[in-house]
Image (spheres, rainbow, N blue to C red):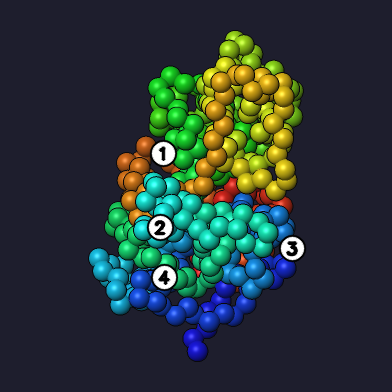
Amino acid sequence: MNMMKAAVFVEKNRIVLQDKPVPEVGPLDALLRITTTTLCGTDVHILKGEYPVAPGLIVGHEPVGVIERLGRHVTGFTEGQRVIAGAITPSGHSYACLCGCGAQDGPGTRHGFKAAGGWKLGNTLDGCQAEFVLIPDAMANLCPIPDALSDEQVLMCPDIMSTGFSGAERGEITIGDTVAVFALGPIGLCAVAGARLRGASRIIGVDTVTERLKVARHMGATDVIDFKTGDVVDQIMALTDGRGVDVSVEALGTQSTFQWALQVLRPGGRLSSLGVYSHDLNIPLAGFAAGLGDYSITSTLCPGGKERMRRLMAVVATGSVDFSSLVTHRFKLDQIEAAYELFSHQRDGVIKVAICP
């Protein structure tokens, strides 16, 4: 049996490198040899036991690679081709897909927990922090990488870019809007870029890490606020002359950031939630105007599928957004445990970690 190296969830606070069998390829699958992948904040939730997955699961959901082997019914691709697949891998033919919500094409409830829709890689199926990964429904999910783009240039597309941009899209940002983005990790920074591309005239980034505040300006923020320097709500209301913002994007998944995002909305404003919450979330009575403020609250799971990936790579190809500053650290797969130690503790100015098997 052919074996490979892979990062495996063992138990709470333990993700380790192990030998695992190379996956068998089904008729509609594709086996990718991973050339570049990443660590994600959601992987840290798994590591900490805040999001449940089965022990023995290979983690990771942001694959860039080369097609090693194709299932016998897969057409339109060739072995040896450079491709990406989204973190979310819809089948293309489920009820969720045919209702226009392919991100929710998943198994439903498991382990007493409502599983996150079409997020399969590193959640319900073995993921891509490994030498190889099996991509299900390959014809719906593989997307060729343009020759002019490097692996690292497209590394943000499978999840971080798709999720951050979706926060802007689901928030229905329009030309001239004022937007606040709460938490400037990789997803929040991509939400800043998405807000700029959708025409926001003022984008306020909120964080406390100096390096991230600087990157936010590079990505399109017109104003940045360090939440440790004073009351965030008061500062944003002062910046907007008391009007509030048209759209808030919450990109961390905590009660405080959600509450701030709600409190700074103008009447009729929209809160776009991207965070992964590990505790019950409460909606404050005053911030929600007792339900009478005409507010909209929407949540997003990263859109996937090959057409979404094609569109995101087209944005990268234009050069209209520079994502190079997001990858701050690079590790080999053999160093995966050290990479998790750095990333989970947010040391050394880390924003995004690239892993190259």
Residue 86 spot, x, y in % from top left = 43, 56
**Residue beneath disc 1:** 321
Q: Give the image location of residue 191, x and y in percent.
A: 50, 37
**Numbered circles on residues, count:** 4
- Between discs 1 and 2, the one toward the N terminus: 2
Q: Is residue 349 above or below residue 206?
A: below
Q: Quadrant of the rendered structure where residue 20 is?
A: bottom right
Q: Label 4 amino acid?
A: Leu
**Which residue lies at the image location 33% right of the left edge and 51% below the top edge?**
307
Q: Position of residue 334 (x, y in %)?
A: 59, 72
Residue at image mark 2: 94
Q: Are marks 4 and 3 in contact (CB under 8 Å)?
A: no
Return the residue found at the far top: 241
Please name the residue that numbered disc 4 is placed on.
Answer: 32
Q: Secondary structure at mark 4?
A: strand
How far apart are the alpha carbons under marks 4 and 1? Answer: 28 Å
N-terminal of the two: label 4 or label 2? 4
User: Residue 13: which disc?
Assistant: 3
- Nearer to me, 249 or 157: 249
Name the foreground residue: 319 vs 188.
Answer: 188
Which sits in the foreground, 260 or 115? 115
- Local packing at callout 2 (Cα closer than 10 Å; few below 14, some 14-19, many 20+) is some
- Separation of disc 1 and disc 2 at Cα? 34 Å
Sequence order check, earlier mark of 4 and 3:
3
Q: Secondary structure at mark 2?
A: loop
Q: Is residue 101 above or below residue 63?
A: above
Q: Is residue 153 something one can see in this rendering?
A: no
Q: Residue at x 53, y 50 (%)?
A: 327
Spatial distance from mark 3 to mark 1, Cα to Cα?
A: 35 Å
Q: Between marks 4 and 3, how big is the CA–CA gap?
A: 28 Å
